[in-house]
Structures are given as structure tokens and as C-alpha cells.
């Protein structure tokens, strides 16, 4: 470059410092509170066993299957049907299908039937009542299973220490299952038919079957009079 070549003048616009994109983005960023982060994680992140996530996934697969062509639908059918098993498991309190897997295959239909009949008998609607129903039906299924095994072994002529030990353990498990069944049934009955609370303010009161208590309104006579019906 020759000495006579004029120097390039700097423009004022070149001297001006433009904000970087990162600075601009940072200025627009929001500082989240821990509560907002917790809500964001709760709404946006799920594990694959979350019932809401399973239902959402199945819904998408079903809609895609219905919108697909016949050829595409045929390849999607198997995956769509397999995804339904997760929904069935999440509906276990209503269908009792998950309960059935806790007993032998032979007695699965039995425990489902028992659970549905008890649910109908007591008019169970709440989750706690349905959990008790499944505990009752499942324990009953185990009692049937344990009793069946013991019955098939007790009449055999062959005897060994291992077999006797096995039957002894099985007998203890059977007794435990009987206690669990009675406890669960009693608890369910107490929930559905709570005991009547009766407060009697009297010096002497005798309460027996088929009797009623009549309170005397006379302030002088505060004792309740008990008359047979």
C-alpha cells in the first residue's frame, strides 16, 4: 500500500458495540423459584411406569393406528396391543387383574370372582376399601392353594425329613393366611358398618338385646328407664 493511499475512516456505527445474542438472551431469561422448578418437573417429566405417562403413550399409539393406512396399521398393531398391558395394570384396583398374578394360574379366575363379589356385597367404592377386598381375595386364593398342596401330599405314603419340613412351613403359612383373612374381613366390616356409639347419662343403666332406653324429661328423675320392646 502506498503512502498516498488515504486511511479508511472508521464509522460511528462500527464503533457502536452491539449486544451479543447471549447477552440478549440472558436479559430475557427468568429466574425460577424452587416451587416453579418442582411444578415444571412434575408436569413435564415422567417415568415409564407412571400411569398418566402410560395412558398418554397408549392414546398416541391408538390415534396413530387409526390414522394409518392398512399397510402401516398392520405393522403398528402388535406394538399398540402390547402397550395396553400397562394400562390394564394401572387399572388393577378396578379390574383386579394385578391381584390375579399373586396366585397360581389355576386360581386366578377364582380370586377375581371373589374380589368382585365382595365388592358388590359391601358396595365398595373407595380405594382403601378396594385394597382390603384384594387383600381378602388374594389371601383366600393362597389358602386354597396351600390347602390343595397339603392335601395332595398328606395322603402319600413316602415320608422324608425334607418333606416333613416343607409341610410344616406350609402349615404355618396356612395358619398365617387364615389370620390375615379374618383380620381383613373384620376391618372391612367395621369400615362399612361402624359400631353404634351410645352415650347414657344415668346412675344405673342395663342394656340388653331387644331393649330400648327412654330418657325421662323430668329434671328430678335423671335416670333412664329401660323397658323391653
Image (cartoon, rainbow, N blue to C red):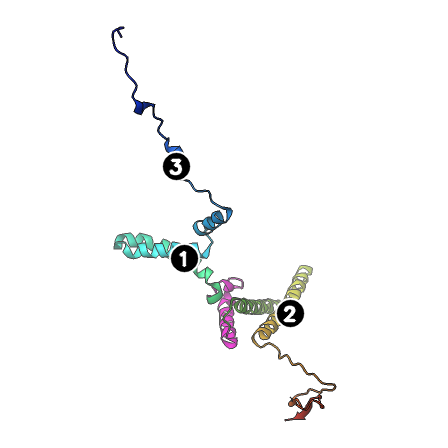
Q: Secondary structure at mark 1?
A: helix
Q: Inspect the magenta stretch and tell me whether residue 98 lies in it.
A: yes
214 relative to 68, above or below: below
Magenta range is 95-123
Residue holding disc 2: 179
Would you call the spot at circle 1 few (<14 residues within 10 Å), some (14-19), or many (20 or more)?
some
Q: Is residue 147 above or below residue 38?
A: below
Residue hosting label 3:
25
Task: Find the distance from the CA under tag 1 to the CA under tag 3.
Answer: 37 Å
Residue furthest right as drawn? 203
Between 155 and 85, the one nearer to me in the picture:
85
Place residue 196 in its image quadrant.
bottom right
Q: Secondary structure at mark 3?
A: helix
Question: Which circle's residue, 1 or 3, is located before the other in the chain?
Answer: 3
Tell me which label, 2 or 1, sits earlier in the chain.
Answer: 1
Of circles 3 and 2, the one toward us is: 3
Residue 186 at x, y percent in the picture: 61, 73
Count of number-bearing discs:
3
Category of crowding for the residue at label 2, using alpha-carbon neighbours closer than 10 angstroms: few (below 14), some (14–19), many (at least 20) = few
Mark-to-mark CA distance, 3 and 2: 66 Å
Alpha carbon distance from label 2 to label 1: 38 Å
N-terminal of the pair, mark 3 or mark 2, is 3
Residue 153 % position (x, y): 62, 67
Q: Which mark is residue 55?
A: 1
Amino acid at each position: 500500500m502506498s503512502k498516498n493511499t488515504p486511511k479508511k475512516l472508521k464509522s460511528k456505527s462500527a464503533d457502536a458495540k452491539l449486544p451479543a445474542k447471549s447477552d440478549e438472551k440472558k436479559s430475557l431469561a427468568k429466574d425460577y423459584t424452587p416451587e416453579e422448578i418442582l411444578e415444571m418437573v412434575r408436569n413435564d417429566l415422567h417415568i415409564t411406569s407412571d400411569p398418566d405417562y402410560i395412558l398418554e403413550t397408549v392414546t398416541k399409539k391408538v390415534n396413530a393406528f387409526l390414522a394409518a393406512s392398512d399397510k402401516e396399521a398392520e405393522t403398528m398393531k402388535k406394538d399398540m396391543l402390547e402397550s395396553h398391558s400397562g394400562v390394564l395394570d394401572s387399572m388393577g384396583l378396578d379390574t383386579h387383574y394385578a391381584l390375579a398374578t399373586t396366585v397360581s394360574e389355576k386360581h386366578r379366575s377364582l380370586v377375581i370372582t371373589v374380589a368382585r363379589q365382595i365388592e358388590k356385597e359391601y358396595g365398595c367404592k373407595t380405594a382403601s376399601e378396594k385394597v382390603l377386598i384384594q387383600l381378602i381375595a388374594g389371601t383366600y386364593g393362597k389358602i386354597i392353594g396351600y390347602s390343595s398342596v397339603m392335601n395332595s401330599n398328606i395322603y402319600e405314603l413316602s415320608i422324608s425329613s425334607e418333606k416333613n419340613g416343607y409341610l410344616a412351613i406350609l402349615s404355618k403359612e396356612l395358619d398365617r393366611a387364615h389370620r390375615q383373612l379374618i383380620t381383613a374381613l373384620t376391618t372391612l366390616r367395621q369400615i362399612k358398618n361402624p359400631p353404634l356409639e351410645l352415650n347414657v347419662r344415668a346412675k344405673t343403666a342395663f342394656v340388653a338385646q331387644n331393649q330400648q332406653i327412654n330418657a325421662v324429661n323430668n329434671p328430678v328423675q335423671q335416670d333412664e328407664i329401660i323397658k323391653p320392646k
